[in-house]
Image (cartoon, rainbow, N blue to C red):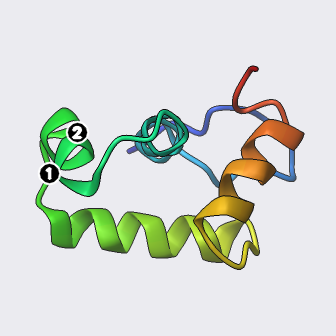
Amino acid sequence: MKKNITSNPIIMGIDEQELKMIKLIADSLTNAEISKEMEVKSSVLNGIRKNLISKTRSKNIASLVSFAYKYGLLKV
């Protein structure tokens, strides 16, 4: 079972794999680079990304990264 990264109710549903993906997206990695780094197929990445956008109620990847900074998942 995947461990949640925090007990904060706003971001409680985000697990370690999803956090890693957010960090890689914020670092401007391509889908191919993220897939290689996370050792998953691109179709799996699409599912993870879709779930993250839904969980965070983001509209797109840019708003997902903004959410991550706002709630302290990413540091400047």
Seen from the viewer's position, the closer of residues 16 and 33 is 33
Seen from the viewer's position, the closer of residues 4 and 36 is 36
At x 48% / y 33%, what residue is drawn? 27
**Mark 1 and mark 2: span between their CA atoms?**
6 Å
Q: Where's residue 36, x and y in %?
A: 13, 40
Residue topped by disc 1: 40
Q: Is residue 45 left or right of residue 23?
A: left
Are the residues at dot 1 and dot 2 in contact (C-beta closer than 8 Å)?
Answer: yes
Question: What label sits on residue 38 in the rendered view?
Answer: 2
- Quadrant including the N terminus: top left
Number of numbered markers: 2
Q: Residues within 10 Å of mark 2 (few under 14, many from 20)?
A: some
Q: Where's residue 72, x and y in %?
A: 82, 30
Q: Secondary structure at mark 1?
A: loop
- Quadrant including the C terminus: top right
In the displayed structure, 49 sits above or below 40; it is: below
Three-letter amino acid code at the position of disc 1: Val
At x 20% / y 33%, what residue is drawn? 37
Q: Secondary structure at mark 2?
A: helix
Quarter residue 49 falls in:
bottom left
Q: Is residue 71 left or right of residue 73?
A: right
In the displayed structure, 61 sits above or below 70; it is: below
Q: Where's residue 12, x and y in %?
A: 73, 48
Q: Is residue 17 left or right of residue 42?
A: right
Q: Residues within 10 Å of mark 1 (few under 14, many from 20)?
A: few
Three-letter amino acid code at the position of disc 2: Met
Q: Residue furthest top?
A: 76
Quarter residue 63 falls in:
bottom right
